[in-house]
Amino acid sequence: MKKLAGFALLIMLFASTLPAQKSEITVPLRFDQYYTLDQVYEALRALNKAYPQLTTLETVGQSEEGRPIMALTVNNPKTGAALDKPGLYVDGNMHGNEIQGGDISLYLLDYILGGYGKNPEMTQLVDKAALYVVPVVNVDGRYHFMADANSPDSNRSLRIPVDDDKDGLFDEDNADDLDGDGNICTMRKKDPFGQFKTDPEDPRLMVRIKPGEKGEWSMLGEEGLDNDGDGRVNEDGEGYVDPNRNWGFDWAPSYVQSGSGEYPFSGVGLKGLAEWTMTKTNIAFVWSFHNNGGMILRGPSRKGLGEYPPQDVAVYDYLGKQGERIMPGYRYMISWKDLYTTYGDSGEWATQTMGAYFYCAEVFAGDSEAFKGVSERPEPGTPREEAVRDIFSERISDRERIKFSDNVVQGELYKPWKPFKHPDY
C-alpha cells in the first residue's frame, strides 16, 4: 500500500503539465507539441524498445474505426511477476478532445523509466510494483480531433453513429469548417433585434445588450450548414456516446443521462479495455487523466451509492489532501457532492468491480487563463463554487481571456471574424 501511495503521489506531479512531441520520436521523449495518435503509438514503441527488460507493449482493445488501444506495462521481472505485485493502472484521453491526458501519461512513463537505476525512489517503485498505462482510451476521438477541423468540444464521443434528430439518418449534419482554417468557430449575423453588440473595448468580442438597448448581432452557434435540408444547422453531429458514461457498473439509459449509449459497453473499445483490466487482478489503484477544472475527483459518483467504507475514505482523504499540496490550485473533491452525479463512469467500475481506489485528475485550471495578478483575483469560494467557476469560466471574462491570448499564447485562442455568404441565414 505504501508503494502504491508513492505512485499515486508521483502522478500528481504531472497533472498540471501540458506535454507534447515532435514527429521524430526519440527516448527520452520530447514534450514541445502535442502528439498525434500515430506519434503516441510510435512513442510507446520507442519506450518499449528503449526499455525492453522493464516494459511490455500490447493491444488491449480495438476502436469502432479499427484503431488499436495500446497499453504499456512497466515491471521488473527480476523482482517478480507483475501479477504478484500491487498494480497501478493509469489512462488518459477517454474523451477524444481531452488530449492532455494522453501526453501526460506518456510523460509519466518517460519519467519513471528514465529514472530507473538513477533515482532510488523510481527504482524502488518499479521493482516493487507494476504499472499499467493506456495513454489514449478514445483513439478515434484523438485521431479526428487532431486530423480534422475542430472546436474545443468536438470529437469527444465514441464513433458510434446516433440519429440525434430522428430523421433516419445518422451524424449527417455535423459542424462545417466554412473558411477552411482548421477550426470550428462561432457564427454571428447582423440583427437589430439580436441580443448582442460589439464590445466597445475590443471589437473582436461580443457582449450581451442591456434591457432597452438596441441589438447588433445574433449568435448562430458553431460554423456549419444545413447539410440535410431539414431547416436546422448542426443538429446531428458526431455521436453522441460518452465513453465515461458507457461502463458496466451503475449504467443508466439516455433518458436518465445523456450520452450513455444503447447499453453498457456498447463501445467495443471500452469493452475490450475493461475485459483486459479484469485480467490484471493485482490492480489496486486506478488513475484517469481528464480535462479540465483543476480537480482531484473521487467517488461515489452519485449519492445513492452511499459513502465508501471509513478505512477507504481515510486513504482517499490522505492522498487527496497531499495532491492539493503538490498541485497548487487543484482541489480534492467528491464527484456527486462537489460536482455532479454521473452513471456508468469508469470510476465506479474500477471501485465496485475491481476493488481498486480511483481518482480522476481533471487537469488544467481555467483560472490560469485569467490575465490578472494575484491581488486582482477573486477570493476563493467553496470547492463546488470554485469547480463550477472553472468549468464554466464564470470567473474569467472574455476580455481577460483575450488579453491572455494576446500576451501569452501569441493570439492562438482567437480567430478574427470573417464574412461568409451563408445559404441558410
Image (cartoon, helix red, strand yellow):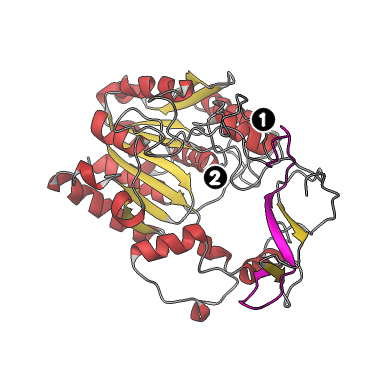
Q: In the displayed structure, does residue 321 sit left or right of residue 144?
A: left
Query: Tag 1: residue type?
Result: Glu
Could you tell me which secondary element the residue under label 1 belongs to?
loop
Residue bearing the label numbered 1? 172
Callout 2–callout 1 Cβ contact below 8 Å: no
* Segment tinted magenta in the rendering: 207-232
Could you tell me which secondary element the residue under label 2 belongs to?
helix
- Residue at image location 24% in from the left, 54% down from the top: 318
- Residue at image location 29% in from the left, 33% down from the top: 250
Residue 227: in magenta span: yes
In terms of image quadrants, where is residue 370? bottom right
Residue 406 shows in the view:
yes
Q: Position of residue 177 (x, y in %)?
A: 76, 42
Tell me if residue 419 comes above or below residue 212 in the rendering: above
Residue bearing the label numbered 2? 100
Q: Nearer the viewer, mark 2 or mark 1?
A: 1
Q: Position of residue 269 (x, y in %)?
A: 48, 23
- Residue at image location 35% in from the left, 43% down from the top: 342
Residue 243: in magenta span: no
